[in-house]
């Protein structure tokens, strides 16, 4: 028996002998530096496709994938067994990350995922959703040495490479898959616990929306072309009729488009708005290139300079509306992609991380000993992630203050429209004479626009979305109605040339002056303002009148609940989340509607 044991130990040492280089490298490099770059993942996707084509990665009984499929592909298990392990074994047994970067790379992004997902599905989502400021990412299948004893690295969860990498990362990227929620796995739940505890920004990875956008843009471009063709049939001498019609209809049309909650109606009104804006813009361009004498006969009370200024203002308004409808169509498609990812992230999730499963019993005991009574807080953090596609310290603080952040999704349409409105008027320069007051006011508008764009690019994701929503609300409620009134008054000759320019520029400046403080303060900063803060933050992020007034769907910070001795749970916060997720009770205990995966983002604005 002693000889047999000695022989087994010798065989084990002999099997591990070729991997001495890998063990030494992982001992020398800190675990939080076992990272790969965006380019590494891009090349890995290409290498997986080549390996499938060459027959190096083949279907198995556990993973019967289609070799011709380039959307999902083989699972991470299969890629690891048939590609990563053989390649890293030949290199010395280190991980795939240290094989590419033996000195390691600082961790900016931590990727959490489940191994049953398709390899192409996983890589495409990570590549598409990679944060701009992240240089290197820590991913378990690439960071851990698959040929070495990984179990020894995971005995104590808080001292594991997972914990070290997550604590040093700036972002955590959650990758949904088509099979089940990653939060049915206990290690993913533990990573959510660490991210919550260390105030990390949690982002949801989405599949590339480029194919869907490419399919949606041809109808939009067709409506632009149709609008231009129809405008060619309209006589220029009668263009004042369409001018008046456009002046009275562009704002109501915008409101109707924004109020649609169903995807089909949003698509329909987007196309109507695109056609109408393109038609008016094409007609105005014809005016710029044609003899305007027949047109001026319909404006006998106006001077030429007033008419010129009003015409240029109309051109810019039509251009900004056309930009809005095109970007709003892109936002609509991206919202559909986000809804799909939200459904995947919720599939199989039972309302609490307490239901998450773990393969190793020792890992389960170690993880729960660290999570302890914090499961309810982790559940609320995951709930914010389900609703908005991200979970940041600011969003979590706003939810604790009572703000409902459901369906708070990015929209660049209003920002694009406001930036288009900041362009200068061509008629501000009359020959060699420049109106100094108008010119200086235009320079101020451009400076505010550039300052907003610079600040927007440097903000975290949640602050970007909140500032965009702030611009959306100030435009819809205040600035666009005033612009419509100015538009009508200018046509009737109520403004001279300089007054029209100054008034139009001031309205644009108000929009940027409102968006800049909102961007700097963030949703939590606005919500924490005494008396009016929560209501103002709720108004900015609301997607309906009911939420703007009450915001009744926010997850409450605390709530007590009577429980019988037979059904008592160890964590009141878990019960609170389950009541919310099941849709049976509101924050005050009253009945409320269900929040299902299909209702998440029914309309995302």
Image (cartoon, rainbow, N blue to C red):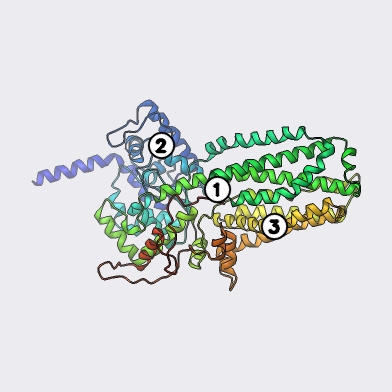
**Label 2 Cα neighbours within 10 Å, binned few <14 / some 14-19 / many ≥20:** some
Alpha-carbon span between mark 1 and mark 2:
25 Å
- Residue assigned mark 1: 132
Q: Is residue 524 visible?
A: yes
Residue 478: image x %, image y %? Answer: 69, 59
Residue 137 x %, y %: 46, 48
Q: Earlier in the sequence, mark 1 or mark 3?
A: 1
> Under tag 1, what secondary structure?
loop
Q: Quadrant of residue 76?
A: top left
Residue 512: mark: 3
Decide if residue 342 is on the left or right side of residue 262: left
Could you say whether the residue bearing mark 3 is in a helix, strand or loop?
Answer: helix
Q: How many neighbours does mark 3 have within 10 angstroms: few (below 14), some (14-19), or many (20 or more)?
A: many
Residue at horizontal 65%, vertical 62%? 517
Disc 2 to disc 3, C-alpha distance: 43 Å
With respect to residue 271, does 457 lie above or below? Answer: below
Of 199 and 118, nearer the camera is 118
Foreground mark, 1 or 3, reads 3
Which residue does the image show at 56% across and 68% down from the upper left?
Answer: 534
**Image location of residue 83, percent across then percent down:** 35, 35
Q: Which mark is residue 72?
A: 2
Sequence-wise first label, 1 or 2? 2
Toward the viewer: 97 or 74?
A: 74
Residue drawn at the location 74% of the way across and 41% of the way down:
280
Number of the front mark, 1 or 2: 2
Seen at 79% across and 55% down, the residue is: 486
Q: Report which quarter residue 569 is drawn in.
A: bottom left
């Amino acid at each position: 028996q002693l000889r047999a044991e000695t022989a087994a130990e010798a065989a084990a040492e002999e099997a591990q002998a070729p991997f001495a280089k890998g063990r030494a490298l992982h001992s020398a490099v800190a675990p939080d530096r076992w990272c790969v770059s965006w380019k590494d993942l891009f090349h890995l996707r290409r290498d997986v496709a080549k390996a499938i084509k060459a027959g190096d990665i083949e279907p198995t009984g556990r993973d019967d994938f289609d070799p011709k499929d380039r959307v999902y592909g083989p699972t991470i298990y299969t890629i690891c067994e048939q590609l990563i392990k053989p390649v890293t074994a030949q290199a010395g047994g280190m991980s795939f990350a240290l094989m590419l970067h033996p000195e390691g790379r600082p961790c900016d992004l931590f990727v959490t995922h489940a191994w049953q997902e398709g390899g192409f599905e996983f890589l495409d989502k990570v590549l598409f959703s990679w944060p701009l400021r992240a240089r290197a990412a820590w991913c378990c299948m690439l960071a851990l040495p698959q040929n070495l004893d990984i179990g020894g690295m995971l005995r104590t969860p808080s001292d594991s490479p997972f914990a070290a990498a997550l604590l040093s990362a700036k972002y955590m990227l959650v990758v949904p898959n088509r099979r089940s929620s990653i939060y049915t796995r206990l290690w993913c739940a533990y990573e959510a616990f660490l991210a919550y505890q260390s105030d990390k920004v949690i982002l949801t990875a989405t599949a590339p929306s480029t194919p869907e956008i490419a399919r949606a843009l041809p109808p939009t471009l067709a409506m632009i072309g149709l609008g231009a063709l129809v405008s060619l049939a309209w006589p220029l001498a009668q263009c004042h009729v369409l001018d008046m019609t456009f002046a009275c209809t562009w704002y109501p049309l915008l409101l109707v488009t924004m109020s649609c909650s169903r995807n089909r109606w949003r698509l329909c009104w987007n196309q109507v708005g695109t056609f109408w804006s393109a038609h008016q813009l094409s007609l105005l361009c014809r005016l710029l290139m044609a003899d305007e004498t027949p047109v001026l006969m319909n404006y006998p009370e106006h001077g030429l300079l007033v008419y010129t200024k009003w015409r240029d203002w109309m051109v810019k308004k039509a251009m900004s509306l056309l930009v809005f409808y095109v970007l709003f169509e892109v936002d609509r498609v991206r919202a559909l992609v986000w809804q799909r990812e939200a459904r995947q992230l919720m599939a199989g999730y039972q309302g609490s991380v307490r239901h998450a499963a773990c393969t190793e019993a020792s890992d389960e005991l170690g993880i729960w000993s660290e999570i302890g009574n914090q499961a309810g807080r982790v559940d609320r953090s995951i709930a914010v992630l389900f609703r908005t596609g991200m979970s940041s310290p600011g969003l979590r603080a706003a939810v604790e203050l009572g703000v409902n952040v459901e369906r708070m999704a990015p929209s660049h349409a209003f920002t694009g429209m406001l930036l288009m409105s900041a362009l200068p008027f061509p008629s501000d320069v009359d020959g060699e004479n420049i109106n100094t007051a108008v010119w200086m006011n235009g320079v101020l508008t451009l400076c505010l626009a550039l300052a907003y764009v610079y600040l927007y690019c440097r903000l975290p994701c949640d602050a970007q979305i909140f500032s965009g929503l702030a611009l959306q609300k100030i435009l819809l409620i205040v600035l666009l109605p005033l612009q419509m009134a100015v538009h009508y008054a200018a046509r009737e000759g109520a403004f001279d040339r300089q007054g029209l320019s100054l008034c139009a520029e001031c309205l644009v400046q108000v929009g940027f002056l409102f968006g800049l403080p909102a961007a700097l303060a963030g949703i939590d900063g606005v919500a924490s303002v005494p008396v009016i803060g929560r209501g103002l933050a709720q108004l900015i992020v609301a997607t309906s009148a009911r939420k703007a007034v009450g915001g009744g769907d926010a997850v409450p910070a605390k709530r007590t609940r009577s429980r019988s001795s037979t059904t008592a749970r160890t964590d009141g916060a878990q019960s609170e989340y389950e009541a919310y997720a099941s849709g049976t009770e509101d924050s005050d205990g009253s009945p409320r509607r269900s929040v299902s995966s299909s209702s998440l983002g029914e309309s995302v604005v």
